[in-house]
Image (cartoon, rainbow, N blue to C red):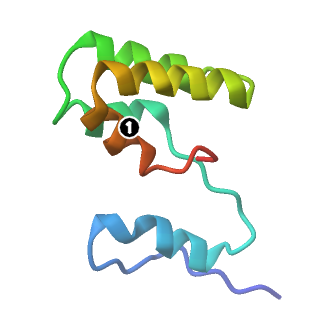
Amino acid sequence: MYNFNPILKLKCPQGLIQAIASVFPNAEHRLCVKHIHENMKSQFKGGVYKDMLWNAARATIVVEFNKKMAQLKSYNSAAYDWLIKISAKQ
């Protein structure tokens, strides 16, 4: 029988992804665009960033995603640099 302990002891919230990965090593992990935007808007305020983020997130093919990310980069390279640190798979 598989024993599962649902209590995760984390040193900080940033370790949540790694903690979940250690408990569920074969599970695919994705980030919520809403939460990415919540974190992003602390540095980059304005509806244009939200729209650009969602446009990139809604892209269904890689070429379209890259085009939307290039638009963000031309608008604000710092916002692009912040966002590109998150894997496109997520």
Q: Is residue 7 left or right of residue 90?
A: left
Quick check: 77 above or below 83?
above
The quarter of the picture where residue 49 lies is: top left
Secondary element at tag 1: helix
Q: Residues within 10 Å of mark 1 (few under 14, many from 20)?
A: few
The quarter of the picture where residue 79 lies is: top left
Looking at the image, which residue is at 44% across and 44% down? 84
The quarter of the picture where residue 3 lies is: bottom right
Looking at the image, which residue is at 53% across and 20% down? 68
Indicate the position of residue 58 as horizontal and vertical percent values.
61, 20
Indicate the position of residue 19 as horizontal and vertical percent values.
48, 75
Indicate the position of residue 83 as horizontal and vertical percent values.
39, 40
Indicate the position of residue 59 as horizontal and vertical percent values.
65, 21
Please tell me which residue lies in front, 53 or 12: 53
Q: Is residue 78 left or right of residue 65?
A: left
Most extreme residue toward the right is 1
| Pointer 1 residue | 35
Quick check: 87 above or below 46?
below
